[in-house]
Image (spheres, grey):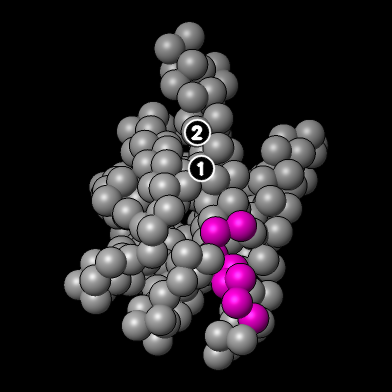
């Protein structure tokens, strides 16, 4: 589990982290705003993934595939490599296997139901892996590193927020339809999780700009 070996490698890792962070923060904002501009009205879908079935499909799929490529290209330490590869593959699956949350139940075929199930499992697993990055891999072990304590608190807050969003999103299906329709709880849970992981990756990328000359295996 070697640290980054050269400034060029460190710069590449920083850019990948920043790229993941920017896309993560932008996605839950760009999708509803873009949909509103196209349709002339601001209406939220049942979930972020629901924008696959709107005019914003290409933005949704392209953004997730970009995140997937960034994660597949991400190389740092052995555990980071493994988890980022798994997360990258999951992101591509989430992009290419559409959700069925915004599709009328009576119009779904058996294959549609299976695809929707794959999407939900992959999305939950993706958020779970990204929470591990925030809770275990991103925090700096050396508390004497400038700003380490504040960043560690932010990483862990983001990680717990992702886990809470997963739990609330899964239980939102138990709410009555008359509650889910106006409130869109799954959308807000997914938006919170995506913003949290995006913020964590963005901060980690910026932190590396200052840390790369003294990078240690625990950073």
- Image height of 82 relative to 182, above or below: above
- Image height of 37 relative to 109, above or below: below
- Image height of 177 relative to 81, above or below: above
Q: Is residue 140 magenta?
A: yes
Q: Nearer the viewer, residue 161 or 177?
A: 161
Please name the residue that numbered disc 1 is placed on: 126
Q: Residue at x 54, y 32 (%)?
A: 120
Q: Nearer the viewer, residue 77 or 129?
A: 77
Q: Quadrant of residue 25?
A: bottom left
Q: Residue 122: which numbered mark, if any?
A: 2
Q: Is residue 38 left or right of residue 104?
A: left
| Residue at far left of view | 8
* Label 1 neighbour load within 10 Å: few <14, some 14-19, many 20+: many
Query: Mark 1: which secondary structure?
Result: helix
Q: Is residue 146 magenta?
A: no
Q: Residue at x 38, y 64 (%)?
A: 3
Regarding residue 12, the answer to whether it shows in the image is: no
> What are the residue bounds of the magenta stretch?
136-143
Query: Mark 2: which secondary structure?
Result: helix
Q: Residue at x 68, y 75 (%)?
A: 153
Mark 1–mark 2 distance (CA, rounded to whole Å): 6 Å
Q: Nearer the viewer, residue 191 or 141?
A: 141
Q: Residue at x 68, y 60 (%)?
A: 161
Position in image of residue 117 (x %, y %)? 53, 23
């Amino acid at each position: 589990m070697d640290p980054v070996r050269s400034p060029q490698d460190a710069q590449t890792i920083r850019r990948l982290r920043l790229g993941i962070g920017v896309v993560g923060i932008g996605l839950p904002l760009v999708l509803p705003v873009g949909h509103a501009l196209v349709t002339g009205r601001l209406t939220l879908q049942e979930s972020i993934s629901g924008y696959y079935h709107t005019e914003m499909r290409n933005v949704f799929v392209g953004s997730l595939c970009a995140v997937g490529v960034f994660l597949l290209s991400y190389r740092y330490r052995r555990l980071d490599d493994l988890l980022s590869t798994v997360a990258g593959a999951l992101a591509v699956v989430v992009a290419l296997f559409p959700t069925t949350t915004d599709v009328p139940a009576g119009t779904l075929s058996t294959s549609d139901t299976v695809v929707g199930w794959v999407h939900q499992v992959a999305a939950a697993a993706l958020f779970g892996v990204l929470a591990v990055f925030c809770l275990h891999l991103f925090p700096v072990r050396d508390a004497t590193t400038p700003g380490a304590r504040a960043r560690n608190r932010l990483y862990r807050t983001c990680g717990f927020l992702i886990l809470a969003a997963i739990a609330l999103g899964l239980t939102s299906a138990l709410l009555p339809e008359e509650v889910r329709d106006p409130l869109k709880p799954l959308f807000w849970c997914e938006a919170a999780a995506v913003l949290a992981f995006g913020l964590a990756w963005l901060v980690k990328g910026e932190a590396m700009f200052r840390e790369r000359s003294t990078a240690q295996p625990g950073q």
